[in-house]
Amino acid sequence: MAPFEDRVRMVELACESDPRFEVSRIEEGPGPSYSITTVEKLLEAGAGPLCFVIGADAFADIRLWHRWEDLVRLTEFIVVTRPEACYSVPPGARVQELSGLDLRVSSSDVRDHLSDSDSSIPLPAAVLAYIRRHDLYRSQPI
C-alpha cells in the first residue's frame, strides 16, 4: 500500500513530538513483513518480554495470521477494545484488555477514508500532510 520508506517516515512524524518513542527499522527487508518475524527479531536482539498492542477487530482475526500459534506463545497481547468489536481468545494466549480509549477508527478505516480522498480521520497533521504530498493510499490521484 505504501513503500517501507514512506511508512517509516510517517511513524517518525507521528512520534517526533514525544521523546519516549523511538522508531525502529527492524522490519526493513525484502518481501512481506510478518508480525512473528518482527517478534523473533526483537527477541534475538535481547528485547523482552514483549507485549503486542492490537485492536480488538484485528485480534478477532489472529487465527488467520502467519504462524499465529508462535506469536501467541511468544507475546502477551494488549487488546484495545473497539465499539462493536468482538473476539475470542485463542488457546494459550495471554491477553489483557484495554478499554476506555474509545478508538472508533482502525488503521484499515484510515486507509479506506484516505483512498476515498476523505481526510476527516484522526491523524497527526504532519502525517496527513505527508500522505497528501506523496499521494499515498488514494485509489484515484487528486
Image: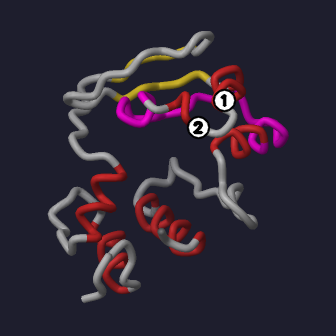
Q: Which mark is residue 71?
A: 1
Residue closest to the eye, 106 or 130: 106
Residue farthest to the bottom, as pictured: 142
Identified by mark 1, the residue type is: Leu
Q: Amino acid at mark 2?
A: Trp
Numbered tag placed on residue 20 in the rendering: none
Residue 20 vertical position relative to residue 55 in the rendered view, above or below: below
Lateral position of residue 104 relative to residue 23, left or right? left
Instruction: Quickly name the residue at label 2.
Output: 65
Contact? badges 1 and 2 (CB < 8 Å): yes
- Nearest the eye: 16 or 34: 34
* Residues packed near mark 1 inside 10 Å, few (<14), some (14 to 19) or many (20 plus): many
Query: The magenta stretch spans which residues?
Result: 41-60
**In terms of secondary structure, where does tag 1 sit?**
helix
Residue 73 image-quadrant placement:
top right
Residue at the extreme right of the image, as rendered: 44
Mark nearer the viewer, 1 or 2? 2
Secondary structure under tag 2 reads loop
